[in-house]
Amino acid sequence: MKENDEYLIRTSATGTRQVKVKFIEDDRRVSHLWFQKWNTQNDTPIGEQVVIYGEEIPELIEFLQVIENLEIPDENKFNRKFEDLRLIHLPDADARMVLANHPELVAEFARSQITTQDVIALAYRKDQLDEFQKLLGRNDVAENDWQQFFERNQWIFGYGLSYVFTTGLEGKDLQSTIRGASLLNSGKRPDAVMKTRAAISALCLVEIKKHTEGLLKESQYRSGTWAPTAELSGAVAQTQENVRAALDELGSHHRFTDDNGNPTGEELTAVQPRSFLVFGDLSEFKTDHGINEARYRSFEDYRRNLRQPEILTFDELYQRARFIVESAEGG
């Protein structure tokens, strides 16, 4: 309580008696929660105390209420902003207010059966899209950093590679090894071993480099013609070698087995496997006054006339990932 002003209504002639109004302010607010183990025998505290103050208290209560009914997408780790969880568990009155302010959501809910898992997946992808953009803005991102990012976000490859739906192999990380029938022993290591999803699952190999690698040499090879950098041509050769090794080791068709030799039910066809190289950034061809069309034309001529791998720049992959997220938001 807080004592404020008082108002004198009446006082006796002698001044020994008074009638006053005293204003006392009480906001019924819990200022802090104090957690402390206590020894009841000798009335002393045990160990360290934990104190939660002010706005931390309702936030803790809200957090406990939200996670009580939270749907976990799967057994893997996932990150979620607390603001997104609040939206999932809005009280009825607040939910009606959100829908009133955003009528387009009414149509979306009417034509689709959206679940909490869908909301979490979309919010997670939006976060990862932001991280993708931040990585593109840095110059110190190593190949391994990109590898780990795409390992966490296989959905980007799932829609981003020429719009052919691809996934990782069952129970294996993207960087599975091509060596022998198991793809697990030491040998060639492409950055991603994936498969297409259709009536027949076909092998798909991906090589991931850095977005800061140059696509074309700075100097002209001939007038109006620029050659690919040594890094780009070397990455192309590396990807082609991984394809050759896959065909030699796997054959045209492979059935996977577990450590005990039992079939897992997963099959893979390696007839003319597709291969992709994620390399560089098209912003290389931008100048202060527009696009250098001659250099850009040289790059397009080079990659369009390659049978394999198909070269995809990081900014192109980002825009396709952005399209996935925005399409999901717009229904």
Image (cartoon, grey):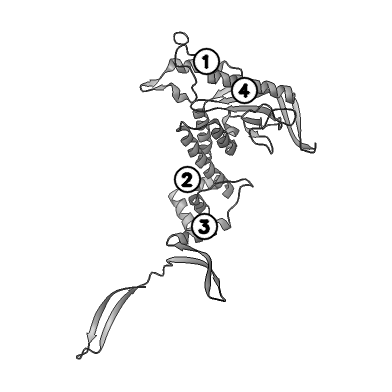
Residue at 58% in and 29% down: 163
Does any portion of residue 271 appear in the rendered image?
no
Residue at 53% in and 55% down: 89
Q: Residues within 10 Å of mark 2 (few under 14, many from 20)?
A: few
- Disc 2 to disc 3, how far (Cα)? 28 Å
- Disc 4 to disc 1, how far (Cα)? 19 Å
Tell me, for residue 104, which label it has, or none: 2
Instruction: Mark 3 and mark 4 in contact? Answer it, CB < 8 Å.
Output: no
Q: Of circles 4 and 1, which is in front?
A: 4
Residue at 57% in and 36% down: 148
Does any portion of residue 166 appear in the rendered image?
yes
Q: Residues within 10 Å of mark 3 (few under 14, many from 20)?
A: some
Task: Residue lying at the far bottom in this picture: please name it.
Answer: 14
What is the x, y in percent for residue 20? 27, 82
Which residue type does callout 4 highlight? Answer: Thr
Q: Which residue is mark 3?
A: 63
Does label 2 or label 3 sit earlier along the sequence? 3
Does label 4 or label 2 sit earlier along the sequence? 2
Q: Which residue is mark 1?
A: 301
Does label 4 or label 1 sit earlier along the sequence? 4
Does label 2 or label 1 sit earlier along the sequence? 2
Q: Which residue is mark 4?
A: 239
- Disc 3 to disc 4, how far (Cα)? 48 Å
In the image, 186: left or right of 83?
A: right
Which residue type does callout 3 highlight? Answer: Phe
